[in-house]
Image: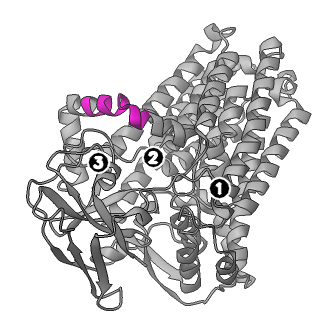
Amino acid sequence: MDSTTVTGLQVSMLRRAWVLLLLVAGIILSLIVPPGQSPDEHSHLLRAYWLSKGVITLNTPQGSSSGYLTDDGLNAYLRGYTFYGRRPGTPIDLGQVREESHLQWTGTRHFVEDPAVGYYFPLVYTPQAVALAIGERLHLDLDTSYRLARLCALLSVVAIILAALRTYPMNAFVAAVLLLPMCLFQDISASQDGVATALCVLGIALFMRGMDAARTFTPCHMAMLCLSIFLVATSRNNMLPMVLMPFAVALARRSGKGLAGAGVTLAACLCWTVIALKTTADLRVVRAYPTSFFIHQYFAHPGNFLQLLSNTLTNTDLAHAYEASFVGVFGWLEIQLPRSFYTFAMDMLLALGVLSLSVRRIRRDYATRLVLVLGAFSAMLLIFFALATTWTQWGAPTIAGVQGRYFTCPMLMLGYALSGHASSAQPGLRKRLAGGALAAFLLATSYVVPKTLIDWYYIDGPQRLPPPALSTLAKPFAASASVSGPLDRQTVSVHLQPDSRDAHLPGNSFIALLMPTGTLYLHQNDAWLPFDASQPLAYSSGMLETLDARLTVDRDLTDFRGARLLLGYGRGSTPTKSFNDMLAQGRYAQVYEVQ
């Protein structure tokens, strides 16, 4: 082992203590958080289950989104747990939780649509897949199988980060990013976020070692670098710029085999992207133009995309939302930490970034830092471009669907770039200050995060930030919905009667589906169209009248399981800032929850 590997955060006792701390924090949070509370966790668990059956690409029956055969017991378990705890003011019914936990594997399987995870190369789900396979083989109940999947994912995260620390030291800023509440919350879920983030750290650590001429770098290291980058780039599509790393290492080491490995990695990433696009059909989002139209328009007229990007980045409301969801917004993006903690966390990250910055060896490692910085900013740009072309309506003023947690991996790259190879230098005053700041940040996180989660899930606590309260509706509002038959092959009839005080005034009636994630779909022209809450909603200047509608259920509505069907109207002929503003100014009611 090189002499430099026993310095800084790489010291054996400190490394083990840090990893043990991460494991203990993960176990404690896992005991607090109920199943299925991470964004799209049920989808990720399905992908892990399909991997346990050897499924690499999904099936796409005619007229349906992509998916695969799923055990009926697992499907029932996921549907039962996915939406627990997301009704502000109503703590979880622990009796119902215990009843759901006795569900068993049935051995019978039916097709389940879930196209969102079809774009990810499934090998990143290996820990969860192994756990589910063990649970099914040993006839464990589904709750035990799920919790085993959580534990395997957490242990994998800890093991991978330990391997990264043994490969190359990390500075205090990188450690703080990994200890952000959002990262910890995802580490204890059955989604792929924790494993993918840990693999990103391992890939960067291997890159740093490969670019450091003072350290050995074997063909095994190169193979691990290529594999980790492939897994990250195919599970986090915006991280494709990481493929620059093996090329840079091969050039720095003058390795022909390294260049070949880097080329294979790039080709494999591109091949999987093409395969995933060809084999995955997603009918959840209906837009006036296909994704190819957006890509062509933005490449032909880059100024249009740059203007859209500028509008998004200068939108203060979106900036605050990115900041909050980067630090931590739990559940399905509804459990917020105290506002003061977000300010504290960002200030601590800024301070740790300054304390981790070093220019001591910049002449020697400028190429290393340049690759990391270029890769990080390219990855950030790809986040906005991907969502502009796949999730945003044409003509929208800002890019929809961006979440702060998407920036975790690019920030880790920037974190390593701050100190470069100087991160292995002997600790001094700045490192002691950074250690103290990191400890303070950890103590604050250790208090705020568990308290917030316990308040939300088990106590009707003060930290709840409820959406527009259905209980505060004006009494004269009349709205009803009825299901005319089984949900899988009939229709829902809805009826809206405006209040007599509002009838024949300018306004617009609406039918909307509010997803557990907060995403909103409006029913327009017999289709469900996604609505970006940041863009104005313009009312038609018609008069409010009775609304009767029949909504198709045989496919369209069942794609929105767990959504709340809202029926209502807003008065006036001028746009409002957001849908929530419209709800606050108008009248509405939840009339159905899609099962």
Looking at the rendered image, the disc whose residue lies closer to the viewer, 2 or 1, is: 1
Amino acid type at circle 3 is Thr
Q: Which of the 4 quarters of the picture holds residue 471? A: bottom left
Query: Which residue is disc 1 drawn over?
Result: 461
Q: Alpha carbon of mark 1 to alpha carbon of mark 3: how far?
A: 35 Å
Label for residue 237? 2
Query: Which residue is disc 3 drawn over?
Result: 392
Query: Can residue 502 be found in the magenta stretch?
Result: no
Looking at the rendered image, the disc whose residue lies closer to the viewer, 2 or 3, is: 3
Q: Main secondary structure of the magenta part?
A: helix
Please state which of residues 275 and 195 is positioned toward the viewer in this rendering.
195
Q: Alpha carbon of mark 2 to alpha carbon of mark 3: how far?
A: 17 Å
If you read the primary sequence from the N terminus, does the residue marked by circle 2 or circle 3 appear first? 2
384 left or right of 157 in image: left
x and y percent of residue 314 in the render?
35, 28
User: What SS does tag 1 mark?
Assistant: loop
Q: Which of the 4 quarters of the picture holds residue 119? A: bottom left
User: Residue most toward the right?
Assistant: 13
Vertical side of 216 occupied by 554: above or below: below
18 left or right of 172 in image: right
Colour scheme of this structure image? one colour
| Residue at (58% x, 14% y) in the render | 366
